Image (spheres, coloured by chain):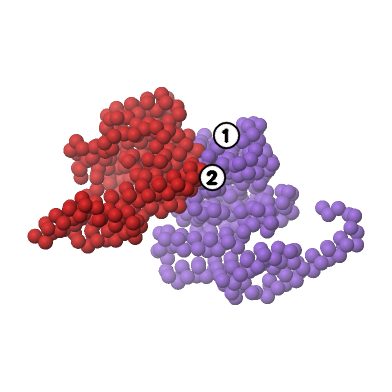
Chain colours: A purple, B red
Amino acid sequence: MTKVSLIIPTFNRPHLLPRAVESAQRAGREVEVIVVDDASSDGTASVCASLQAIKYLRVDRNQGVAGARNVGLLESSGDFIAFLDDDDMRLPGSLDYQVSLLMAQPDAGFIAGGVMLADQNCVPTGEVAIPRGPSGDLFWEVLELRVHLIPGSVVIRKECFFEVGIFNRRLAGIDDWDMCTRIAEVRPILVDAEPVCIYRVASPDSGQGSSALGRQMRSAVRHQERLFSLPRVQEATPAQRRLVRQNTRRRVADTLSWRAAHEFPRGAFRFAASNFSIALQLSPFWAARPNHLRVLWRSASTQLLSRSKNLASPTTPVG
Amino acid sequence: MMSQVSVIIATRNRSSMLRRAVESVRHANCNAEILIVDDASEDQTQQVGTSFSDVHYIRAKRRLGLGAARNIGVIASVSPYISFLDDDDQRLPGSLDAQVKLLEEQPEAGMIYGRALYGDDQGLTQGSYYPEHCRHGDLFWDLLRWNFIPCPTVVFRRECLTRVGLLEEEAPGVEDWDLWVRIAELYSVIAIDKAVAIWRQGTPGSGQFTSRETKLHREAHRLHVNKWLRLPRAITAGTAQRRKISRDFAACASRQLVWTAASRLKAGRMLESARVAFAGARMYPLSMSRNILSLSTLRSLSSSLETYWR
């Protein structure tokens, strides 16, 4: 039996859910789609009743995304587990493709694929995020947040949950990274560049989990200290640990500051300010790199240009 | 044929007792799925676990703790009913069959518990049991006061976990109590007025025991304030009811702590006794002092002090 269970945790998004479910059903021949309704207070239940061939689970007490994923795991019967957020999409045939690769490597814990980035309407922007690095032991890369992992692009062997435990309910938004790190510690992982899912990139005001990017990254940096209790980190030299800590802080500060510079001219002042202040706390030197000033300047100039164009022809609808 | 009930035995470094626990489950139900979750043991647990032919042995590669190990077992299990058994406890013959039958007869109940016989270090019983009187029905408010449900006696429905979520992993020692509270919020609880398990008690002789006890109280206190009193049912019940419940909770817990402190004192362990009393006073200053100043406690304190000085 090589069935895949695809778990879709959802909370108050009945208008987006059918799209995710349909894409999931087309992603493989033998897919068990499990929708976990995390105590939604709107029409999610009735929308799910109209969907064909899904397993609908309703949690009555809100568990958060990690808790909902765990409940999905509880009712899953497949040998491989995939996750999909309710606002993202799987590409057709992608699950079969990833599972065939994973079956060829019996010791690999999970496979990570490429991600097509999309705007708020889930229309791909043309950018593809490819997880960096060759396959194999990627523990240090994952721990340092160097591998780009999105829950929708990963297929995990079910045994891995028996070896390292299930999602940590307390870690909202970074539970998937925590899980992948713990798996990568005990097993090699597969990386494949082929895009497998469409990821709706959060904008500062879309109310998605990663809209609060700064806070999420800061909690990741904090949680890393707890992951340092893993045996493989304990065996490493103190200098190595220091290096991991330093690299992570720098990378996070760099990303946050870049995002802040990118969003500031578009009017997301509060988002930019909070991101930049968190970046400054983590690594002042990397937060204030001249590169970010350049990004700021470029973003501002394109913003100004488009605004002047809009002023010139106010009747044209903005796509 | 699909098994009726999954018994999850989370174990760590107790290979000598594991076999006895598994045998007891075999006699307790003719059709049980037994899962051993080995929390990264460093002894012969792996050999013992894989030696059974009809047991699902799962080995965690990293040490995870009791709650997480039980969660792994739950996810690996397939039956509609679930029961937890500790590696040093035992199920009594036929007990699972009887409990599952009762639970099947009452579809509105989420879980069933029963009496546990106290066992000594060797797992032998002296005939005393707990609880004296098995309450049943809507136990939500009772469970918010005190945990009177011995973990090895419980059988609950799998669907309960879907509705209330899995076990709390970061509440060492009180993860079972937390689950009972959350199940009792939505379901009624039934009980069987019979002993169904043997519950091995820890040895109070070691200093580790007291530190564990105060830690349990601290965890329970934290969950009570931050989680249980914030459940929807507790919130809708109103402030007066919540205040009453937390007063009762403090009274129960401090009585227990005073009793522990007194028994430590009687055993001649001044320092441990003081530590327990101090920890209690920090959590529940009012009811702790009320308990210590109560006449019966003073009397037993003076007698224990007498024996101590003598």
- Whichever of labels 2 and 1 marks the residue nearer the N terminus, that label is 1
Say what secondary structure mark 2 lies in: loop
Is residue B67 found left or right of B292 in the rendered image?
right
Residue to which mark 2 is pinned: A62
User: Which residue was labeled with disc 1?
Assistant: A55
For badge 1, the amino acid type reads: Lys
Q: Nearer the viewer, mark 2 or mark 1?
A: 2
Image disc number at residue B98: none
Which of these two is toward me, B247 or B66?
B247
At 83% across and 54% down in the image, what residue appears?
A318
The percent coordinates of residue B142 (x first, y second) are 37, 40
Q: Amino acid type of disc 2?
A: Asn
Q: Secondary structure at mark 1?
A: strand
Q: Label 2 is found on which chain of the structure?
A: A
Q: Relative to the observer, which residue lies in front, B109 or A110?
A: B109
Q: Position of residue B29 (x, y in %)?
A: 33, 28
Q: Foreground: B131 or B240?
A: B240
Residue B32 percent location from the top left of the image:
36, 30
Task: Judge left or right: residue A179 versus residue A316.
Answer: left
Q: Quadrant of residue A248?
A: bottom right
Instruction: Tell me, yes or no, if residue B66 can be seen here.
Output: no
The disc numbered 1 marks a residue on which chain? A
Disc 2 from disc 1: Cα separation: 19 Å
Residue B55, image x and y in percent? 35, 35
> Of all residues shown, which one is farthest toward the left?
B310
Tell me the residue at 89%/54% (across/down). A316
Q: Residue at x 42, y 39 (%)?
A: B140
Question: Looking at this view, is A151 or B204 the one in front?
Answer: B204
